[in-house]
Image (cartoon, rainbow, N blue to C red):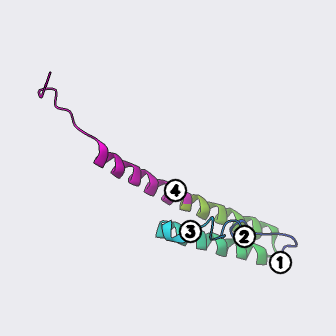
Amino acid sequence: MLQGFVPKVFDPKVFDPKVFNPKGFNPKAIVCLERAAAAEQRACDAKDVELRAEHLGMADRWRKLARSFEFVESVNRFLQSCKHSVRVIDPRDDKG
């Protein structure tokens, strides 16, 4: 085990209920974050430096994928809100 190494996903600020609300997260993003946590745990347990680096890199890639899922979902929510608020103006309908 690495001395003094604290995986990013185990940071208490990340899972503080005031900060992190999994109910609002995309389910695919939650799976990615769980896999990132597992990869970081494997990194902690790894004796070999190269294997440790590989697991940490894998954890970073899982977190990036989670952010991608969240970004796509936020764009979709934005587009849906725009769809409902856009008013089409017909230039042939001149009231002036």
Q: Residue at x 84, y 73 (%)?
A: 2
Mark 2 residue type = Pro
CA gap, disc 2 and disc 4:
23 Å
Q: Earlier in the sequence, mark 2 or mark 4?
A: 2
Q: Earlier in the sequence, mark 1 or mark 3?
A: 1
Q: Secondary structure at mark 2?
A: loop
Which residue in the structure is indicated by mark 3?
Answer: 21
Q: Residue at x 66, y 72 (%)?
A: 37
CA gap, disc 1 and disc 2:
20 Å
Residue 78: which numbered mark, if any?
none
Mark 1 residue type = Met
Q: Residue at x 65, y 66 (%)?
A: 59
- Can you give x and y, in whole percent of width and height, for residue 46 in the image? 78, 76
Looking at the image, residue 47 lies above or below residue 62? below
Magenta span of residues? 67-96
- Can you give x and y, in whole percent of width and height, for residue 67 in the image? 55, 58
Which residue in the structure is indicated by mark 2?
Answer: 12
Q: Which circle, 4 or 1, is nearer the viewer?
A: 4
Residue 1: which numbered mark, if any?
1
Kindly check if marks 3 and 2 are in contact, taking CB atoms under 8 A apart as contact: no
